[in-house]
Image (cartoon, rainbow, N blue to C red):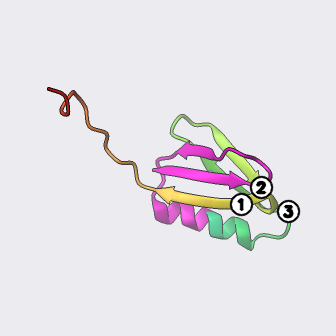
């Protein structure tokens, strides 16, 4: 699953590929937001790297399923 994280005052979003389901990611977001002001949203990508963002800096989080990309040269003649 692809997760895009918008950070305030940063022009590019963070894109994280994770093995978690949309429900699991949403639960992590809810837990981070429910914490006190010092809370952080943390997620681990498919390579084991951990991304940690302070909740106060979150702009948005977009959850999207991986879409399969076509392989080959189907559109050319």
Point out the residue furthest to the bottom here: 34
How many callouts does the rendering have?
A: 3
Indicate left or right for 67 with 1 as reference: left
Point out the residue furthest to the left here: 77
Q: CA distance from mark 1 to mark 2?
A: 5 Å
Q: Is residue 32 above or below residue 48?
A: below
Numbered badge on residue 8 = 2
Do the residues under discs 1 and 2 have CB atoms within 8 angstroms? yes
Numbered badge on residue 67 = none
Q: In this rendering, which labeled residue sits more in front, label 1 or label 3? A: 1
Q: Which residue is mark 1?
A: 59
Do the residues under discs 3 and 2 have CB atoms within 8 angstroms? no
Indicate left or right for 71 with 14 as reference: left
Q: Secondary structure at mark 3?
A: loop
Q: Secondary structure at mark 2?
A: loop
Q: CA distance from mark 3 to mark 2?
A: 16 Å
Numbered badge on residue 38 = 3
Indicate left or right for 34 with 64 as reference: right
Q: Earlier in the sequence, mark 3 or mark 2?
A: 2
Residue 2, horizontal then vertical, whole percent: 49, 49
Classify 10 Å Cα crowding around label 3: few (below 14), some (14-19), many (20 and above): few
Residue 4, horizontal then vertical, whole percent: 58, 51
Residue at 48% across / 53% down in the picture?
20
Please state which of residues 63 and 20 is positioned toward the viewer in this rendering.
63
Q: Which quadrant is home to the C terminus?
A: top left
């Amino acid at each position: 699953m692809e997760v895009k994280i918008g950070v305030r005052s940063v022009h590019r979003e963070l894109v994280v590929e994770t093995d978690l389901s949309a429900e699991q990611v949403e639960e992590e977001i809810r837990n981070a937001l429910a914490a006190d002001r010092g809370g952080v949203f943390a997620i681990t990508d498919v390579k084991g790297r951990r991304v940690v963002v302070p909740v106060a800096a979150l702009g948005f989080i977009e959850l999207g399923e991986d879409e399969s990309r076509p392989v080959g040269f189907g559109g050319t003649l």
